[in-house]
Amino acid sequence: MLLKGISVLSLVFALVMAAVLNVFCGWTTLLAPLYFVLCYLVLLALAFAFLWVCCKAVDQKKPQEEDSRFYRTIMHVYIEALISLVLVRLHTRGLEKTPKEGRFLLVCNHLFLADPGVLLHCFKKSQLAFVTKKENQSMFIVGPIMHKILCQPIDRENDRAALKTILKCISLIKEDKVSIGVFPEGYTSKDGKLHHFRPGVFKIAQKTGVPIVVCTIQNTRMIFKNLAKLKKTDVHLHLVGVIPPEDIQGKSTVEVSDMVYEMMLSDLGENFRPEL
């Protein structure tokens, strides 16, 4: 939407400038493509400046207790533009199984820093807030927006601090503020395989009685490599299945973790299982 708007405005500007200069100066209309490019670049820079100003206005030291509709809207608009700019073609399957009512816990494998953006784009109506490593809070632009949409930082090396994050996520779901997204591996997979899960995150579903939406994502690791060659990247996002609350009643978090792991692996294929 953002890039289409910029393209339309740039085209109108180029045609008007070409017509005006041709009438008054006798300049050729062949310069219209140049006017288009210049206007496009200026508008793109202004769009980035607007995003930068919005993020600079965020005080991340101030607790955020409500999902910001304004920042979530901005996020969706700019993610959509970024997906186009980095030449990503999204292929989705199973998204129609997304729960239409109520909150849920979304889990997915983790390959690359672009994964949350793809999931946020594909689950626009779900108000996803991710559990994210605390280092992401300091990321340029990303950190402030995550803060405003209730993403929760987690200290993966401090069990007590991590438990506080899990409890906060439980509270957010119970208060019907957001659905929670997690990458149960805890880290991006360096070899692309599906690695051991940290079962503690499944307490979120157990304590809130919400369904678990199981997803897989593939090929995001190739985005920047292909972009350097000006090649498009086909990214695949599958909603493998939805585990209803009654299916995890009485199970330990380890048992739930194993169930989800095998569901993901059934979609990805056995070649994604790491060697022991």
Image (tube, rainbow, N blue to C red):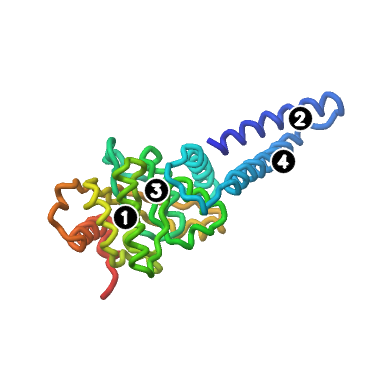
In the picture, the quarter occupied by the C terminus is bottom left
Amino acid type shown at disc 4: Leu
Residue at which label 1 appears: 167
* Real-space Cα separation, disc 3 to disc 4, in angstroms: 37 Å
Q: Which residue is mark 3?
A: 129
Q: Residue 64 in the image: x percent, y percent? A: 46, 47
Q: Secondary structure at mark 2?
A: helix
Give neighbour class at mark 3: few <14, some 14-19, many 20+ (Cα, 10 Å): many
Q: Nearer the viewer, mark 2 or mark 1?
A: 1
Looking at the image, is mark 4 or mark 1 earlier in the sequence?
4
Residue that lies at the very extreme toward the front in this rendered image: 62
- The answer to which of marks 2 and 1 sits earlier in the sequence is 2
The residue shown at (48%, 62%) is 135
Tell me the kind of residue under disc 1.
Leu
Q: Where, by quadrant of the figure, is residue 203 drawn?
A: bottom left
Amino acid identity at mark 3: Ala
Q: CA distance from mark 2 to mark 1?
A: 61 Å
Point out the frontmost of discs 3 and 1. 1
The percent coordinates of residue 164 (x first, y second) are: 34, 59
From the top left corner, tell me how far across and down residue 136 is, in percent.
48, 59
Tell me how far mark 4 sits from mark 1, CA to CA: 50 Å
Report the Cα–Cα distance between label 2 and label 4: 13 Å
Residue appearing at x 27%, y 53% in the figure: 204
In this view, 254 is above or below 275: above
Marks 2 and 3 close (CB-CB < 8 Å) = no
Are dots 2 and 1 in contact, CB under 8 Å?
Answer: no
- Of labels 3 and 4, earlier in sequence is 4
Which residue is tagged 4? 38
Tag shown at residue 18: 2
**Residue type for callout 2:** Ala
Q: Residues within 10 Å of mark 2 (few under 14, many from 20)?
A: many
CB under 8 Å between discs 3 and 4: no
